[in-house]
Each structure stands twice: as structure tokens, then as C-alpha cells.
Image (cartoon, rainbow, N blue to C red):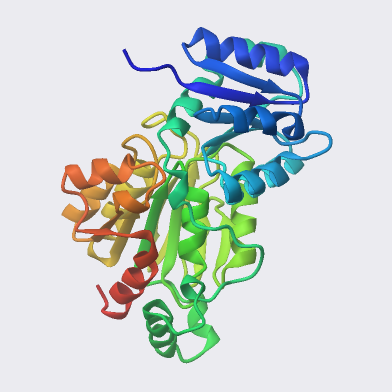
């Protein structure tokens, strides 16, 4: 019989600590440490490190973000954040994910006790997924502004290809033209840091990108804003009817599915409500299948870190339709689930390390593939 997972719960509310601990214990997960703030928790953690930490964002003496950054420097391990579903809470949670948190659960401002006692609130599944995460491969979060490729002062392959690709555009007017090709990304657990690492190395001359990152409503807006501030690309939370153009990234909004559509000579996105697909909304499969149908061989698809299989079948349909398809390799994935499923079913033509993904995408674009 496998050993039960050990979890630390750090939250300034005694009520929250009690109910979260009860919920986890009822699922067979041992809560070995509870504490009201990180400073109280630290000596307990050093005495017996758990498998996962469940961490509140806002606490006295040391906030969750500051603690998380220290933890990732000194003892990297899986952390699940608890955040309120507010605009400010969304922004703080994005900072936490960028700083190394594996995932998060959202606490409502009203009906908190009912939420904490609900086995379906997602906490147990998130903790179990976090325990399997390889946090040591997470890209280092950036503070601000686009970075030099791979953080190097020397021109990299990605930088050289970016320069070559940029030279093919003669004016800014080209940026408003409909993209001839479409790039589709799909990611889940660990995807915030991963997608940031890729987009920061891509030039504004890239073909239009459509992206699904598994994330709840409201959080995708903060995600898009963060990416927009750190990339040369224009990154927007998608709205129904938005055009897919060179230099633009459209992020599927949480709680909605996004599909690619042709509108005359243009590509646009359709944003609609609908049932969960593979337990997700937005779903990577929904996006990828629409890209296969609308763009065919003019598309490039890439599937990144995440648990489950969402996107694998859609990527296979893209490959069958003539698209070029890539999957992130196991060694660089935080959770090797979605890319593994894609590789196993033959959906991925190329298995690529995260550090090599920007250069691979640029090479494919420069070759007209």
C-alpha cells in the first residue's frame, strides 16, 4: 500500500485550516502541518517537509507570494494556492503561478464554509496532481519586459531566426494583415510559466497564435495582461469575432470554448459557452479540432505541460489534416500528461524541450511549413 500524501496547510483563518484539513483527511491525505502564517510554518516545514503545501495568498507578517519565492529558492516543492475570486485575487494568483505555484483553488467570498466542506471543490484533485509535479523544471519567472532569448547576452538560435523572420516584413502595415498560418497552443498545469517562457522569445512578426490554458473565468484576463506586458506580441483575452492576425495572441477566456473559423479570407475566433469537454472549459481539443478543420496544413500545433489528455486527440486531427505538430518533452514538463498522451497516440511529429521550442517554432515559420 502506497504511503499517504503529506500536506501542510498555511492559512491565517483557523476555520479555513480546520475545514481544509478535514476535507483532505477524509480523502486519505495526511495533514501533517497547519500554521497561521509562513513564519510560524517555516520551522515546522524544515523539521519534516511535506509532499505538498496548500498556501493562502493574503496573510499577516509574510504574504503568500513572498513566502513562495523564498521557498522556491531554498526548497522547491509543489504548492497549491488558495485565492479569492476577485479581480485583485486573480492578479495575485497570477503572480503566484509565475513564482512557481503548481495550481490554485478559488475561495468564494460568500458561502465559504459550504465551499470548504464540498468534496467537489477541486482541492483534493489539485493536491494529488501537484504531488506528481516536477517543480524543479519550472522556468524562472520574469519580473517585467521581454527578455533576451534564453536569458543570454549572446545571440541564440531563436534570436537569429527571429531577426530573419522579422526581415520578411517590410512595414508595420503587414502586422494588420490576416495571417497565412495559424499557431495553436494548449497547456494546463505548469502552463503559466511555460507559455510565458515561449512567448517572451517570439517576435511580433509571428503568425497569429490561438491559445487555451486551463484556467477559470476571470483569471484568463489577468493571464493575458501579464503575457502582454512581457512579450513583444499583442496578447488579448479573446472575444467572439476577434481576428487572428500576425503578432497577436488570443487567449481563450475561462468558462468558454474557443474555436477557429474562416470569415472570407480571414481567420477569426468564435467564443461560445457549452458543456465541459474532457472536464474542461475552455478545452484544448475543441480549439485544436477547429484549427484542423479551418487551417489544415497552414497550421502549427503545440501541446505543453498539463495533466490529463485534453488536446491530444485534437492534435492528432491537426496532424492528419496536414499541420505540423509538436509536443513538449517529458524532461521539461511540470506534469507530463497531455504531451505524453499526444506522443503515445502519434499526434506529435516532433517532441521538443521547452528551451528549444521558440527556435523550433521560428524555424518552422521561416521555412513556410
Residue at the outermost front position:
47
Identify the residue at horizontal 61%, vertical 14% (top origin). Answer: 21
What residue is at 38 percent from the left and 41 percent from the top? 335
**Residue at image point 72% right, 34% down:** 38
In the depicted structure, whether residue 18 falls above or below residue 198: above
Where is residue 172, by image quadrant? bottom right
Residue furthest to the right in view is: 61
> Which percent across, then down, holds residue 102?
52, 40
Quadrant showing the N terminus: top left
In this rendered view, identify the residue nearer to me: 339 or 131: 131
In the rendered image, residue 286, in percent from the top left (x then y), is placed at 36, 42
Q: Position of residue 189 (x, y in %)?
A: 46, 41
- Picture layout, residue 293 above or below residue 113: below
Q: Quadrant of the C terminus?
A: bottom left
Is 107 or 318 nearer to us in this picture?
A: 107
The location of residue 196, given as percent across then percent down, is 52, 59
- Left or right? Give the position of 4 relative to 45: left
Amino acid at each position: 500500500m502506497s504511503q499517504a500524501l503529506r500536506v501542510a496547510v498555511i492559512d491565517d483563518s483557523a476555520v479555513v485550516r480546520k475545514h481544509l484539513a478535514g476535507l483532505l483527511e477524509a480523502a486519505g491525505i495526511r495533514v501533517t502541518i497547519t500554521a497561521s502564517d509562513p513564519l510560524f510554518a517555516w520551522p515546522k516545514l524544515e523539521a519534516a517537509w511535506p509532499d505538498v503545501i496548500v498556501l493562502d495568498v493574503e496573510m499577516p507578517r509574510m504574504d503568500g507570494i513572498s513566502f513562495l519565492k523564498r521557498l522556491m529558492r531554498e526548497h522547491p516543492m509543489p504548492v497549491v494556492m488558495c485565492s479569492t475570486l476577485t479581480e485583485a485575487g486573480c492578479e495575485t494568483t497570477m503572480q503566484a503561478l509565475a513564482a512557481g505555484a503548481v495550481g490554485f483553488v478559488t475561495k468564494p467570498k460568500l458561502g465559504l464554509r459550504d465551499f470548504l466542506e464540498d468534496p467537489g471543490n477541486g482541492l483534493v484533485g489539485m493536491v494529488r496532481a501537484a504531488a506528481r509535479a516536477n517543480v524543479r523544471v519550472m522556468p524562472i519567472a520574469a519580473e517585467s519586459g521581454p527578455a533576451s532569448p534564453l536569458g543570454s547576452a549572446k545571440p541564440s538560435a531563436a534570436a537569429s531566426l527571429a531577426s530573419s523572420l522579422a526581415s520578411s516584413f517590410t512595414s508595420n502595415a503587414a502586422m494588420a494583415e490576416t495571417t497565412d498560418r495559424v499557431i495553436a497552443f494548449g497547456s494546463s498545469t505548469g502552463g503559466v510559466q511555460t507559455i510565458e517562457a515561449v512567448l517572451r522569445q517570439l517576435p511580433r512578426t509571428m503568425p497569429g497564435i490561438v491559445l487555451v490554458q486551463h484556467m477559470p473565468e476571470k483569471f484568463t484576463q489577468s493571464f493575458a495582461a501579464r503575457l502582454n506586458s512581457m512579450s513583444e506580441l499583442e496578447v488579448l483575452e479573446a472575444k467572439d469575432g476577434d481576428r487572428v492576425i500576425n503578432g497577436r495572441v488570443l487567449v481563450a477566456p475561462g468558462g468558454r470554448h474557443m474555436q477557429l473559423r474562416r470569415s472570407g479570407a480571414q481567420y477569426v475566433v468564435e467564443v461560445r459557452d457549452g458543456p465541459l469537454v474532457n472536464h474542461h472549459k475552455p478545452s484544448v481539443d475543441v480549439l485544436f479540432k477547429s484549427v484542423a478543420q479551418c487551417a489544415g496544413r497552414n497550421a502549427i500545433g503545440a501541446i505543453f505541460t498539463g495533466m490529463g489528455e485534453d488536446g491530444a486527440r485534437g492534435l492528432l486531427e491537426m496532424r492528419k489534416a496536414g499541420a505540423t505538430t509538436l509536443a513538449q518533452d517529458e524532461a521539461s514538463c511540470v506534469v507530463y500528461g497531455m504531451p505524453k498522451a499526444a506522443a503515445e497516440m502519434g499526434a506529435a511529429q516532433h517532441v521538443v524541450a521547452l528551451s528549444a521550442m521558440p527556435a523550433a517554432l521560428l524555424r518552422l515559420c521561416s521555412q513556410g511549413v
